[in-house]
Amino acid sequence: MISLIRQHLEDTALLLASVEVAEDLDVLAQGTSSPHGTAFVVPYRERAKPNTRATGGHRQLVETQVAIAFLIRVHGDARGAKRAEAFDEFKGDIEQAMAGWEPHPDSKPFELVSGEGTPLPNNTSVYIQTWETTRYLTGA
């Protein structure tokens, strides 16, 4: 699903400089050298519901959350006001791309769960949104 999300953002969130995949949000906090407007798709959390079939096969609903983070770089902005103002433009682009999008025909449409901005070193801020959808785990 991570690759699908990355491709969907590349195709629809046109303000982003690029879309990359990261394993962990800590990588961003340690200071990445990616340019202004770079977004990252990060696996976050899954919660599984009980198997719905008592006999014959396995079908289990899994609520899946991913984090989408983007970097804002503005030099000469000691208070971060310009960086904070830039959040809206990129947030809006990502929200237009993600809200209601279904990555698979049997998935629930993506919904925004939360968002938060954080300052990083070197005149950089990161804004992280958590998005949720569902998938089914099936088996014999």
Image (spheres, rainbow, N blue to C red):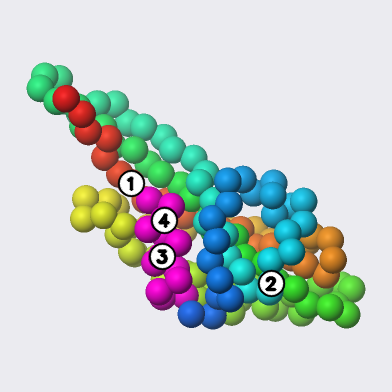
Question: Do tag 1 and tag 2 residues touch (Cβ < 8 Å)?
Answer: no
Say which label, 2 or 4, has the lower sequence index: 4
> Which residue shows up at 41% across the image and 56% down it?
3
Secondary structure beneath disc 3? Answer: helix
Range of residues picked out in magenta: 1-13
Secondary structure beneath disc 1? Answer: strand
Question: Do tag 4 and tag 3 residues touch (Cβ < 8 Å)?
Answer: yes
Q: Quadrant of residue 101?
A: bottom left
Q: Is residue 91 left or right of residue 50?
A: right
List the residue tagged with mark 2: 35
On screen, residue 38 above or below 106: below
List the residue tagged with mark 4: 3
Say which label, 2 or 3, has the lower sequence index: 3
Q: CA distance from mark 1 to mark 2?
A: 31 Å
Q: CA distance from mark 4 to mark 3?
A: 6 Å
What amino acid is labelled 2 in the image?
Answer: Pro
What amino acid is labelled 4 in the image?
Answer: Ser
Secondary structure beneath disc 4? Answer: helix
